[in-house]
Image (cartoon, grey):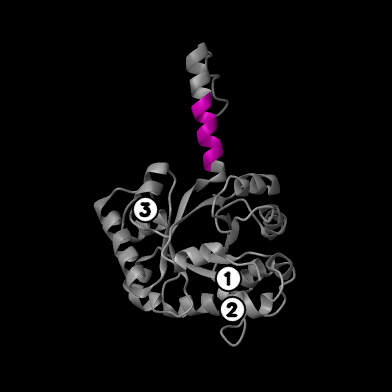
Amino acid sequence: MRKNHVLKAWRDNQSTIGAWLSIDSAYAAEVMANAGFDWVCLDLQHGMLDYPDVKAMLPAISTTNTIPLVRVPWNEPYEIMKALDAGAYGVVVPLVNNREEAERAVRACKYPPDGIRSFGPIRAAIYGGANYPAEANQEIACIIMIETAEALENLDDILATPGIDAVYIGPADLAYALGLPPTGDNDDPLHVATVNRIAESCRKHGVAVGIHTGSLAFTRRYLEQGFHMVTLGSDSGFMARLARQELNEARKDTGTTKPESNFY
């Protein structure tokens, strides 16, 4: 079976850098995967993607060595299994609040006797290669999101769940849980302390820790802190940021005026 080099890096206590994909385009997915990220994650929770997009985008990512992940919209076994059968090498499960919900996510990721994943790796066996059914339980990453007040109360219990490979922190929802505005890159002392607390708990339990960022500065911060799974940004964010930057430079250099907005 094709090895999950990202999961191996986490197990070896190494950092990886990835990107978030929210644009429903196989071409955009192929471009992002070819940029050289360790992994890319297709966002079915908040992006513009549906399952038919996943079926088209995963093969596009397969032209590279970039590991394909999918954030499912909810902790539903059928959503997790469909993403894995399509060829995802890991799932990100949002809003996990307690050990029971963590166990639910793990069971959906693994074939019996370790879990309840139904057998039917339609495309996954093609992408994963020979011996997929026997080795998938060791190569598929189960990543849960810690981002609610209930999850913070149950943190150690959640992290003690066998089969959890990584925790991914959603900074904006975590801010909500702390009574703060839903900011992504967040310097509020309470937010910083809570992120550090989650990271330390992950290290104590031998679980990789990841976080979403929207800037190079915060990516550098978390990589320097030893985070294992750091998102540099999203496809739409990269596109919009560079477009604004170069457009503003072109207007400044040439004196071209900005058109009036059509919005009321």
Answer whether labels 1 and 2 touch (C-beta < 8 Å). yes
Image position of 101 with respect to 222: above or below = below
- In this orientation, which residue lies closer to the viewer: 175 or 23? 23
Circle nearer the N terminus (1, 2):
2
- Mark 2 is surrounded, within 10 Å at the Cα level, by few (under 14), some (14 to 19) or many (20 or more) other residues, namely many
Tell me the magenta residue range.
237-246
What's the residue type where badge 1 is placed?
Ile
| x and y, in percent, of residue 216 in the image | 42, 42
Give the residue at mark 3: 222
Q: Does the stretch in magenta take in 33? A: no
Crowding at dot 1, Cα within 10 Å, few <14 / some 14-19 / many 20+, comes out as many
In the image, residue 120 above or below residue 65: below
Mark 2: which amino acid? Lys
Q: Secondary structure at mark 2?
A: loop
**Of residues 220 and 9, the one drawn nearer to the viewer in this rendering:** 9
Question: Which mark, residue 140?
Answer: 1
* Cβ atoms under marks 3 and 2 closer than 8 Å: no
Q: Residue furthest top?
A: 255
Q: Examine the structure image and report whether residue 242 is included in the region drawn in magenta.
A: yes
Circle 2 residue: 110
Quadrant of the rendering where the N terminus is positioned? bottom right
- Name the residue furthest bottom: 113
Identify the residue at image location x=39%, y=79%.
160
Between disc 3 and disc 2, whose residue precedes?
A: 2
| Residue appearing at x 68%, y 54% in the figure | 57
Residue 58 relative to residue 173: left or right: right
Q: CA distance from mark 3 to mark 1?
A: 24 Å
In the image, which disc is placed on residue 170?
none
How far is disc 3 from disc 2 in space, using C-alphas? 30 Å
